[in-house]
Image (cartoon, grey):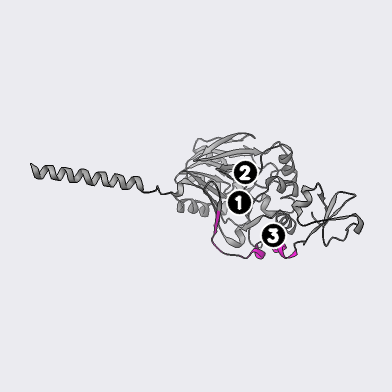
Amino acid sequence: MKKRLLALLLALFLLLTLCACGLDTPATTSAEDGLTVYFLDVGQADSALVTCGGEAMLIDGGNVADAQYVVSALAQRGVTELQTVVATHCDEDHCGGLAGVLAKYPAGRVLCSVTEYDTKAFSDFAKYAAAQERAIEQPQPGESWGLGGATVTVLGPLRDYGDNNENSIVLRIDYGETSFLFTGDIGIEAEDELVESGADLSATVLKAPHHGSRGSSGYVFLRATAPQYGVISVGADNSYGHPTEQALSRLRDADVQLYRTDLQGTVTASSDGKTVTFTTERTATAEQINPTLKNAPASYIGNINSGVFHSDTCASLPQEQNQITFDSYEAALTAGYRPHKKCLP
């Protein structure tokens, strides 16, 4: 009897010790506690996997030929289902791979800026959504939903622009004090109207619009978004010349630290709710990522009479008595000056 009592007391002591140790040990943080965005390397196309709190959303799926790669990328990252699948618009380089994804993964919702479009890529996308009894939905500005501990909000399109690119769905994802802005292929027209709408466009990370095309990432938009980081999804040596010098110089002037899938492969951005950290498959120098850094103006010269400011090498600088010098593009904007369209396009 005494032996049994001693054994019982010993077991109770060990249990209490283990509990006490558990109380003193800080809880570990799993990957599910944060938000992670994988900007997948799909060449001259777009695809981003967003995970948070054990839930996943896919924004675009690359071209038809990218479907197997995207499916493999999801499997490698432990995805078993997708809460939301978004085709920002109906061009193949955004919706093409989604048919293959929907053939493999169940989806809670399927979104696109249109519900019908006369191409095989889009028809296959719609077919596999229908096979899951999911109608393609057109989300409206202001609509929002949760993804784990993050909040996803639709900002655009604000109207029908009559153009696939400008009609792209624009999404903002907020997680703690950090935010991500996904812009599809919008150009300066849609960018400026988003700014005029008064929407909160500020972002820690900007998925640069339209692969860094000349007609995107305008100064007005960049000032409103004020991103710390930008990611350009683009194919190596593509026939479009993306990313263009014009977009790169504007992103440089806005002091955006860039990442590019053509040079760095899949770009992974992880947020703990306070800061965002990046990892890449390959390395590249800052000047490889943005060659315009070596041509950055040392200063900007404003014309006091016209309220226009120029790069310090512009051929149309005002006469010296009408000049005012700014040490940054942002300082010139803050002073109420607007960029000269020829030297600061």
Residue 235 location (% of width, % of height): 63, 59
- Dot 1: what SS? loop
Amino acid type at circle 2 is Thr
Q: Amino acid at mark 1?
A: Asp
Question: In the image, what residue occupies the spot 66% across and 39% down?
Answer: 200
Image coords of residue 131 (percent x, y): 50, 38
Q: Quadrant of residue 11?
A: top left
Q: Which mark is residue 239?
A: 3
Q: Is residue 115 left or right of residue 26?
A: right
Q: Which residues are magenta?
A: 277-295
Residue with the mark numbered 1: 46
- Label 2 CA crowd tier, 10 Å (few <14, some 14–19, many 20+): many
Point out the image quarter for the N terminus.
top left
Residue corresponding to mark 2:
88
Is 117 colored magenta in this rendering? no
Distance of label 1 from label 3 (alpha carbons):
16 Å
